[in-house]
Image (cartoon, rainbow, N blue to C red):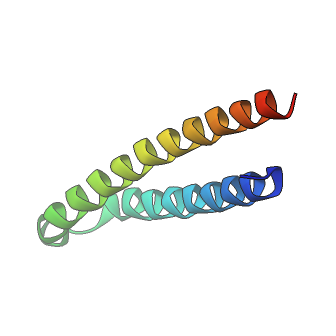
Amino acid sequence: MSAARIEQAMTRLNAAMERIDAARAEIEQRGGDSADERANDAGGSQRVMALVNAHEKLREEVADTIGQIDSLIEELEA
């Protein structure tokens, strides 16, 4: 993977993380909703948070893997 492609991948990952942060902020902001709305949204919010957490874990794994690949490429080019 070239440095340009790695940079593009990292840019996409960062953009995805910004979208996740915005979604999380929106979920937290809805904390002032009525008790009935919170009860109805509780299951959905838990699922969203589980997905957000899984996505963050995968993002970190991808970033680590890209770093390892980049290191290997540097070693091969040296």
Residue at the right extreme of this rendering:
78
User: Would you say 72 lies left or right of 43 here?
Assistant: right
**Which residue is at a point 68% across and 52% down the rendered structure image?**
10
Residue 39 position in % (x across, y down): 11, 65
Q: Which is nearer the eye, 6 or 1?
A: 1
Q: Nearer the viewer, residue 72 or 49?
A: 72
Q: Where is residue 49 in the image (x, y as percent from the top left)?
A: 31, 54
| Residue 77, image quadrant | top right
Spot occupied by residue 31 in the image (x, y as percentages of width and height)? 32, 58
Residue in the foreground of this view, choosing between 74 and 35: 74
Q: How many labels does the image show?
A: 0
Kindly identify the residue that appears in the image at 78 percent across and 53 percent down. 2
Q: Which residue is drawn at 16% across and 61% down?
A: 42
| Left or right of residue 34, residue 20 in this image | right
In-image side of 14 versus 49 (left or right): right
Q: Quadrant of the C terminus?
A: top right
Instruction: Answer above or below: position of 8 versus 65.
Output: below
Asked which quadrant contains residue 28, the reply is: bottom left
Q: Residue at x 78, y 32 (%)?
A: 76
Q: In which quarter of the image is residue 37?
A: bottom left
**In this rendering, would 57 be left or right of 73?**
left
Please name whichever residue, 30 or 13, is drawn nearer the observer in this view of the structure: 13
Q: Where is residue 64 in the image (x, y as percent from the top left)?
A: 57, 35
